[in-house]
Image: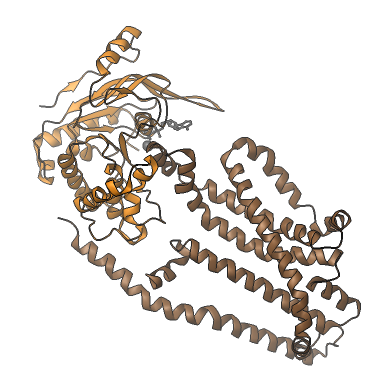
Amino acid sequence: MSAATNPTGPNPSVAHLRVVSDRAAGAPGITLAGVSKTYRSRDGDVPSLRPLDFHIHAGEFFVVVGPSGCGKSTLLKMISGLLSPSTGEIFVEGEAVTKPHGNVGIVFQNSLLLPWRNILANVMLPIDMKGLPREKYLPRAKDLLKLVGLEGFEKKLPWQLSGGMQQRASICRALVHDPKIMLMDEPFGALDAMTRERMNVELMRIQRETGKTVLLITHSIPEAVFLADRVLVMTERPGSIAAIYDVPLPRPRSLDAMADPVFTELVQRIRKHFFTQSTLD
Amino acid sequence: MFDKNEVARERGVAELKAPGAVSKTLNAAWVRPVLFLLFIVVAWDLTIRLFRIPPYQIPAPGDVLVVLWTDWPELLRQAWPTTYATICGFLLSAVFGIPVAMLIAGSKTVESYIYPLLVFSQSVPKIAIAPLFVVWFGFGIIPKVISAFLLGFFPVVVSAVQGFKSVDPDMVDLARAMQGSRFKVFCAVNLPHAMPAIFSGLKVSVTLAVVGAVVGEFVGSNSGIGYVLQRSIGTFDLPTMFAALVILALLGVVLFWIVDRIERFVIPWHVSQRDDFLFAA
Ligand SMILES: Nc1ncnc2c1ncn2[C@@H]1O[C@H](COP(=O)(O)OP(=O)(O)O)[C@@H](O)[C@H]1O
Ligand SMILES: [Mg+2]
């Protein structure tokens, strides 16, 4: 049913690196080749990620689950170019990442909308930051707001919206400059359970309609299985790949998919990874 | 599919709040403090009568009012240099304080060099070094301005540093990931975020600048409310002295009020201004 692919060894040789690099150059999606991260701080080095090798296909919905502090957010920051890896290389759409490249849209747990900008101006933030022509992207921003059901809220300030609506606006902001990739760090972690389920369905629809590659981090195993094409399970800090599971549930999925035996079995299997370690979060 | 209910509720909330807020501000803002002031004046008068306090210790409110009434052209003339020095000193503290705070918040190195010295300098009593400015700059306006500046500077720096530092690092990361230059990110995120804190610093600063100007006038000046104060103490003319204090208090209140107005204009989005915002919207 669900196939676990082998995690790559912790110490890939240089030759192995080169092979991946060559393949990655020009390949769409995201490729990590021997990527590790050790934070240098005053009280010594903090190894956060052991060398990782994997590839996320273009248009794939890829979900990462792992215990708190295993380096998930670090991984996301490295892919967006905000942090550089200690070893290895990252390729986004075939280009080696060395600095912020803007080919990603980011959604954090907090919607992080600027309280002094109205919803539309918040969605336009990436356009302002990149210095792109506003007139050209304004219709797109409005279309996106319509896509997530926030039509008519363009002129509202963030605090006038509920938590779920704020998070939808931040999804629009992540998509407005039309990046190939959407990076989401526990995007629905601050929402109540019901809003969260609705947002999951919503997100799948948005992903289907926009065709974006999505890398989503979550603490919730059911959420991971429900959303993902593939689920990457990480070990405790310093994080490495425990397993990668394919989710063979057909799309489009509704909430009924959670009752599917395939679903429940896979959730159970992933959960086993964390029984032996500590809990998730 | 989208929460029409949620939409309706949000609109309802926005509309419900508005009328209540209007009448509330009209009532609370002016009437209550004036009532309280009246109460204090009456209590003051009663205390003097009840305990037979002689007028060379505490003048009766009536006597002070008489002085205010008969001497107001002279008091007003003397209020002008004090006001001028206060405003100049205050503007200087804003013009220097905010950039210094930016440097301190932006660089750990700058912070480690400057901040401790700044705190240290605060424990030097300004009144003790004010005569020095008279020695350096004579009896003109400059010593008063410097004295006002020195008192107003610190609160601006402390609040602004706190404001700049309290920016959510994820928010900055988000803007940086969109390839915003340091300057653009600062203008779009850090600076507006720090504005409420800066304004609370400015409000403290403007009232302290009044004190600073008066201190400057105490040690070396032949004009200004501080000069009137000192002269009237010398001649035991307590009603004039109290009248001068009333003028100073009024000056402080008016300047505070002006800064408050500017704040409402500059950061209408802030929590503290929301009632007004709804009123205006
Ligand atoms: N700036 C930093 N300096 C030092 N250590 C850090 C820093 N950021 C994160 N870490 C450490 O790296 C590990 C991984 O962090 P993070 O990627 O935020 O984990 P996760 O998102 O999986 O909870 C944590 O143990 C954390 O303490
Ligand atoms: Mg995290």
The answer to whether residue A161 shows anywhere in this view is: yes
The hue in which chain B appears in the rendered picture of the protein: brown
B80 left or right of A276? right
- Where B26 sits versus A135, above or below? below
Residue occupying image coordinates x 79% and y 59%: B142
- Where A203 sits versus B257, above or below? above
A265 left or right of A29? left
- Where A22 sits versus A142, above or below? above
Report x, y in % for residue A3: 15, 23
- Where A278 sits versus B93, above or below? above
Report x, y in % for residue A94: 27, 22
Residue occupying image coordinates x 45% and y 62%: B271
Location of residue B135 by image quarter: bottom right
Location of residue A213 by image quarter: top left
Report x, y in % for residue A127: 34, 44
What's the coloring here?
Answer: by chain
Of the four image quadrants, the one with ligand 2 is top left
The answer to whether residue B58 shows anywhere in this view is: no
The hue in which chain A appears in the rendered picture of the protein: orange
Q: How many numbered circles are shown?
A: 0
Image quadrant where one finds the N terminus of chain B = bottom left
A5 left or right of B147? left
Image quadrant where one finds the C terminus of chain B = bottom left
Residue occupying image coordinates x 38% and y 41%: A131
Report x, y in % for residue B220: 87, 64
Residue occupying image coordinates x 45% and y 79%: B24
For this orientation, the residue located farthest to the right is B235
